[in-house]
Amino acid sequence: MGVPLAMLWMLTLGAACSNGIQMAPTTTTQVTTSPAESSEAVTASTYASSLEETPDVDEVGGGRLLSLSYGDDLLQVGDLRVPPGGGPYPVVVLIHGGFWRSGFDKSLMALLAEDATVRGAATWNVEYRSVGDLGGGYPGTLLDIARAIDHLAQIDESLDLDDVTVIGHSAGGHLALWAGSRGLLAPDDPGAGPVVEPHTVVAQAAVVDLYKAAEMNLGFSAVEALLGGEPDEVPEHYRVAQPVLDAQRVVAVHGRNDQVVPISQSGLLPEAVGVFSDTGTHFDVLDPRHDLWLRTMAELGLEASSQR
């Protein structure tokens, strides 16, 4: 399983960049970590080990797990988990992070998808082309997210497309916020004209403002790599990719001990419902047993499995 190395790479890169260390991704293992970074790494390792111990939702809750394609590329796929019983089911779309870079995948969100499915929601855990993948970056990454969500309308399952929530972590949080604002795009913009529109966006430790993230050099120029340059070089790319929320409900989830994406990014969502933790880290939001996730589920009205 490639998840532990991917998570530790993301952790080390983010922490290094926040400390002003200039380094390429291939050299992250050579960075000397501080006690805080070491603690974060232990948390990531603990979370990753729990991935190996948790069976698929079809073994746990009696539902079905379907691997579906929403495009021709091998990365244009997603895992649809359908709970047992009759629909129509509310839908939760999950979008993983990784600073929009290749090397991370939907397995990062698998535990959350399993838990939300046991709670009665159909979950759509999507993969997409990232920077470093053929066709990834701007606009391919955005188009994949748009296509993946709109593909729900083509799936022959009992899904309630009037009850769709999108949950994204880190850079996936940005993509979730962007997905929620597609209806405000100009007609010719990439991703405009959504078929399926979420009523709620959950931004987990999200990169909220691309302009500020580029200024802060979050993820070692990750924003510039996604969009193809600085804001003054590709202003239209930034305009299209920057989320502008209007009617959608937003839930901002963040831990104050996040060493990868500072909680100040969530502070840029003043109208959002806040689910915060004084001790939470960047990866705690991916743990379905953590208070941050439990409070998020309560906010979404998804009751505990023991109550079903």
Image: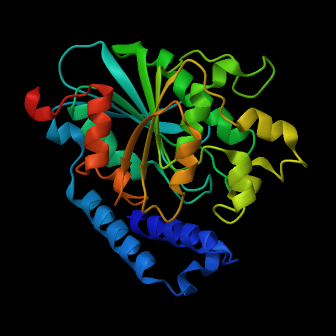
Q: Residue at x 70, y 77 (%)?
A: 22
Residue 188 placement, left or right of 24: right
Q: Residue at x 62, y 52 (%)?
A: 100
The residue at the far right in this view is 233
**Residue 81 screen position, x and y as percent:** 32, 32
Q: Is residue 1 above or below residue 170?
A: below
Q: Is residue 71 visible?
A: no
281 or 229, nearer to the observer: 281
Q: Residue at x 25, y 41 (%)?
A: 294
The residue at the far left in this view is 306
Q: Is residue 29 above or below residue 43?
A: below
Residue 128 placement, left or right of 45: right
Residue 191 placement, left or right of 207: right
Q: Is residue 106 visible?
A: yes
**Residue 41 screen position, x and y as percent:** 39, 73
The C terminus - image quarter: top left
Residue 123, quarter of the rendered image: top left
**Residue 193 screen position, x and y as percent:** 68, 16
State how many labels appear.
0
Q: Is residue 16 above or below residue 125?
A: below
Q: Residue at x 64, y 50 (%)?
A: 130
Task: Specify the color scheme.
Answer: rainbow
Q: Is residue 235 above or below residue 10?
A: above
**Residue 239 screen position, x and y as percent:** 78, 35
The N terminus - image quarter: bottom left
